[in-house]
Image: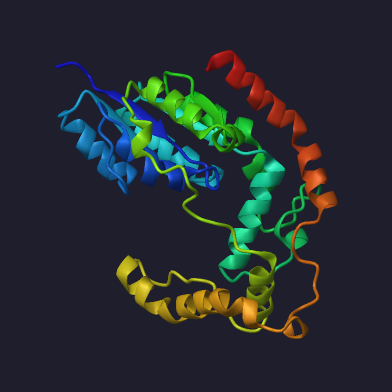
Amino acid sequence: MKKPEVYIHTGMGRTGSTFLQHQVFPKFRGIFYKRHTKFRKAEKIIQKGRYERYLVSGEMEYKKLDRHMREFSALFPGARPIIIMRRQDEWVASQYRRFVKSGYAFTFNAFFTPKNDSGFWEREWLRYMGNIEILEKYFENKPLVLFYDELRKNPEQFIRQLADYTGAEVNMNKINLSPRHTSYNEKQLRVIYTLGKKVSMVKRKPSASKTINVFLNLGRNILRYTTLFFAPLIPNSWLSKDIFLPEPGQLAAVKKYFSKDWEECREYAKQNN
């Protein structure tokens, strides 16, 4: 029996993964894709061999990529990996806002400091060529490297490129191109940052059971989203005056620090896509 073609989209986070997983991949025809399918479950589905093509999608950061790709490639070394990248200064700023929204009350400087690597977010996670090297190490095919700015600039062209690469058919009229999530504004983030310095709203995972963790975090989740909803009504005089969001100079420093790595990724895509 002919081996199926397998395509694996590996994230990264904050690069349009949720949009692709919910709005785009389910509309592809001629390739099997099932939303919210973990890698191990996907492996079992593919091994049944009912379809000629399979698309697997998972969102992960550098620290998880090696383990997942090592395990997946052991069964499907001929799979074709796809990775989408976002310039490091934009990506880390988006990640930081996500953490603040989730209740982490630390400044951007405490979150990420590329020069001495003393922040919460590790410098190695922004070295994107490391991701490419992992994919090259485990798979027989070079990864397709795409960029988030291309998705934002011309989503239709970006989606058609993915469809062509995976051998899928797509009707663009059936795809909703409007953003799935909108960013929280500075007032909302400042309110939750202020409250987060006094009350813990960060989700915990004390149990191996996902259901139990959802129940245990119910109060924190309600507090967090209620705070975000009513944030516009909170007087500014009640809020922390900390400069916590990244300033232009900080982001410029991040961009400069990783400029060589970013250009190497761009050149890799130009040579191999």
Q: State which quadrant residue 23 falls in.
A: top left
Q: Is residue 88 shown above or below 109?
A: above
Q: Position of residue 45 (x, y in %)?
A: 21, 37
| 18 up-or-down from 143: above or below | below
Residue at far right of view: 249
- How many circles with numbers are drawn on the protein? 0
Q: Is residue 67 left or right of residue 89?
A: left
In percent of width and height, residue 39 lies at: 33, 42
Q: Position of residue 149 (x, y in %)?
A: 61, 35
Q: Is residue 28 above or below residue 211?
A: above
Residue sitting at x 46%, y 52%: 180
Q: Residue at the spot x=75%, y=29% of the render?
A: 260
Instruction: Tell me if I can see residue 105 in this picture.
Output: no
Q: How far from the left and from the top, in percent, is residue 38?
A: 32, 46
Q: Quadrant of residue 163?
A: top left
Residue with the most extreme front position: 173
Q: Is residue 87 above or below residue 100?
A: above
259 or 136, nearer to the observer: 259
Q: Nearer the viewer, residue 32 or 123?
A: 32
Q: Nearer the viewer, residue 161 or 268?
A: 161
Identify the image quadrant of the N terminus: top left
Q: Nearer the viewer, residue 227 or 96?
A: 227
Residue drawn where x is 74% and y is 65% of the image: 107
Q: How did the renderer colour the structure?
A: rainbow
Residue 212 is left or right of residue 103, and the answer is: left
Q: Is residue 78 left or right of residue 194?
A: left
Q: State whether residue 206 appears in this view.
A: yes
The structure residue drawn at horizontal position 31% and vertical position 70%, both measured from the top left corner, is: 211
